[in-house]
Amino acid sequence: MVMNINLNNLQIFLKVAEKMNITEASKELFISQPAVSKAVKNLEESLNIKLFNRDKKNGLTLTEVGKEILILARQLKGIENKIYQVANRENKLLSGKVKIGSVPAASTNILPEPIALFMSKYPLVNIELAEGTSNQIKEWVKDRTVDIGISISPFDPYEFEILYHDYMVAILPHNHQLSQEKNVDLVKYCNEIIFCKGGHETAISNMFQKNNIEFKENLTVQNVETLITMVKNNLGIGVTSNFTLSSVAHNLLVKDINPKITRDVGIIAHSFDEVTPATKEFINIMNQFHKSETFSDQDIN
């Protein structure tokens, strides 16, 4: 049996799945609520599946098959975008959209200059930037919410290009007992470490495992701003990446750590060969600015 999918209905489904609300979807699409509901119903009937669970208390939620269809619909939308971009490139006119997921530190330290240059060269291309942790960005790349991610190593299972070599540092208040020490021994002070979730714990746990030391999560926080506050209140020794720390203001002491922990900051994608022409050009511009540099204190000050 051959199925003919109405692409307009699929587009409306994408918007409803994004908003999880018929009213909000209709406002953004500039069509009536009944028209949105009918389009979703028609798509469900044409596919002979149920895309949404409808509940008065919880509202709309995607069914399991609905979640799979959403990922495929995003792929199809990406292909449509790529078709137009390829055609426009042939006409010497690049347009479309580049969707980027980025850790906040990369948004501050890496993206402004490349985005400025890219927008000056290709004013018809829209940039969509979403910020999150490395783990969130990998999920966004996985389900194709974004075209590319700026993330922290490890990068598996995605293709990647390294932009920066990064390393971890310790942060202390000025009155800390280790304030005069050149570096902080993580093995000796393992019970006092505070670190951020979302990527940092992987690098730290790997270091402890390498040195045959039991890894304990004494105090973990969600972002570097909270980490700084905890350290200021003498709750422990903060450990974070030098790259991440550079994106926020603070007046704490920054110390090297022993043993040294290195990480990489890079671009990830399902496949660099399959990205749209606009995304590929954005990656080229990113590489012109930042390809495999080491992010050091000299870059911060």
Image (cartoon, rainbow, N blue to C red):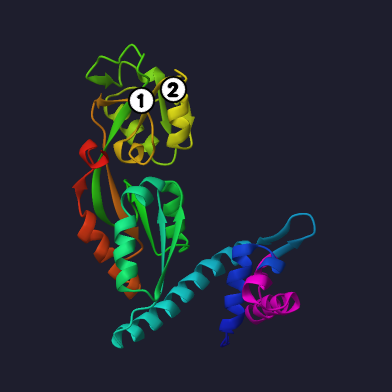
Give the quarter of the figure containing the N terminus.
Answer: bottom right
Q: Is residue 250 visible?
A: yes
As displayed, is residue 89 above or below residue 288? below
Mark 2 Cα shell of 10 Å, populated few (<14), some (14-19), many (≥20) = many
Which secondary structure, mark 1?
loop
Taking the spot 27% from the left edge, 19% from the top edge, the residue there is 185
The Cα–Cα distance between marks 2 and 1, rounded to whole angstroms, is 8 Å
Residue 232's disc number: 2
As displayed, is residue 280 above or below residue 162? below
Residue 123's disc number: none
Contact (Cβ within 8 Å) of mark 2 with mark 1: yes
Give the amino acid at mark 2.
Lys
Q: Position of residue 99 (x, y in %)?
A: 42, 64
Q: Position of residue 69 (x, y in %)?
A: 56, 69
Q: Quadrant of residue 277?
A: bottom left
Decide which of tag 2 and tag 1 comes sooner along the chain.
Answer: 2
* Left or right of 116 on screen, residue 228: right
As displayed, is residue 207 above or below residue 246? above
Tell me, yes or no, whether the highlighted magenta stretch contains residue 44.
yes
Give the amino acid at mark 1.
Leu
